[in-house]
Amino acid sequence: MDNTISVSQLNSYIKNILMREELLHSIVVFGEISGFKFSGPHAYFTLKDKDGAIACSCFNASKTYTPSKEGESVIVKGSVDYYAKTGRLSLIVSTIQPVGKGLLHIQLEELKKKLAGEGLFSPEHKKAIPMFCKNVCVVTSKTGAVIRDIVRTVRNKNKSLNIFVYDVRVQGDGAASTIINGLKIVDDMNFDCIILARGGGSFEDLFCFNDEGLARTIYNMQTPIISAVGHETDFSISDFVADSRAATPTAAGEMVAFDEGQYFAYVKSTISTMFTVLKGKTSQSEEKLRARLGALQDKTLKICANGEKKLGVVATKLENALSMKVVQMENQFAKASLRLEGVNPLKILKNGYFKAESKGKQIQSITDLNQGDDITVIGQDGKAVCKVEEILPFDKKGE
């Protein structure tokens, strides 16, 4: 028993040997994924090939690539670990990378799908680039060749367009943040158009233009924006979300630099065309007006003629009615005259009758008289004053 050791001593010895072996630290291993699963933020799986397998642990696995299927080929980077208490050998993985496309490419494709699903690339939200810009801001590095190319391109066509530059970092750590801040500032400065520009570079050099925060900033901008990043074959997320994409910064300059000579010729031609069209429309309007006035005159004359005819008919009817009314009144007057003549007291007096009055009142009965009264009798040819000597009433027989 003197030459024996304990299990824990053996495991500690093995661990010390492994820890001293530099080859087993930060080692890169190729294999296939088996049994990948999460436990909280950590992932556990087996990395294997046809001849062997090793247990793997990946802490905070969300920070690296997550395999999408069983048996997927990957390249992992990590260090060998030996857990002395249980005698378990494993590989502590720090990064996982799929075989084929790199992790950055995979992340970029996933971000594209996400943003496209949210509608950030939809044509419906894109604003039109003004045809005639007066003030343009270029967001780029002022020390690069990009701004010189844009200015030269614009000035070849246009001398009056105002070009402003907002200096930002276009590569490396923190570049996306400076670009985002710059875009937010210039978006409130009432420019006609903004150009986000950078020259060519590697995929990694241009990766800041694939930032999710930058994409959302571009989407929410009020000013029309052109993305001009890299060369013609380079595409970034900023190209998809911007209102327009230019293959190169020079192409962006072509988009905003309208030709002043062509513009003035276009304005002159447009004014000439407008004058010709207006003159033609004026002539047409005059002809239509004359025609309408003639039709109105004819209609007025017709209305007057019809009115005169109707007025004549009405006047005739009125005249006939008036004549009939006059005849009726004459007949009625004649009848009234006859009736009046029949009751004329003078006519009665002509027949030998007298009218008697006493004290200015007509005597209707002998009861109106007293013996000795003075009365006046009126005849056809005069009157006489008499005195009542005697009153002799008739009996019932009238005698």
Image: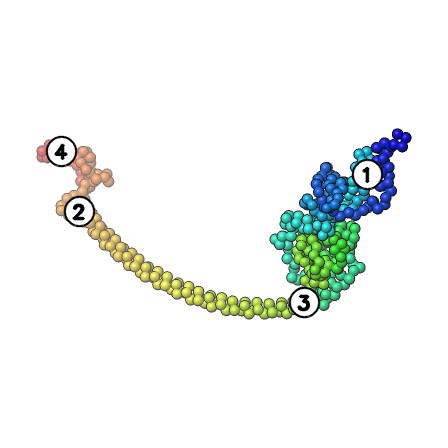
Residue at 39% from the left image edge and 65% from the top image edge: 298
Q: Give the amino acid type for the residue marked by disc 2 in the picture.
A: Gly
Q: CA distance from mark 3 to mark 4?
A: 141 Å
Give the mark nearest the N terminus, 3 or 4.
3
Q: From what the image shows, is residue 183 above or below residue 48?
A: below
Give the mark nearest the N terminus, 3 or 1.
1
Task: Locate the N terminus and report the quarter of the image it occupies.
Answer: top right
Q: CA distance from mark 4 to mark 2?
A: 30 Å
Secondary structure of residue under mark 4: loop
Secondary structure of residue under mark 3: loop
Give the mark nearest the N terminus, 1 or 2.
1
Q: Give the amino acid type for the residue marked by disc 1 in the picture.
A: Tyr
Residue 91 drawn at (x, y percent): 78, 42
**Residue under numbered circle 4:** 393
| Residue 320 relative to residue 74: left or right | left
**Residue under numbered circle 3:** 259
Secondary structure of residue under mark 1: strand
Examine the image and state in which quarter residue 44 appears.
top right
Q: From what the image shows, is residue 366 above or below residue 185?
A: above
Give the mark nearest the N terminus, 1 or 4.
1
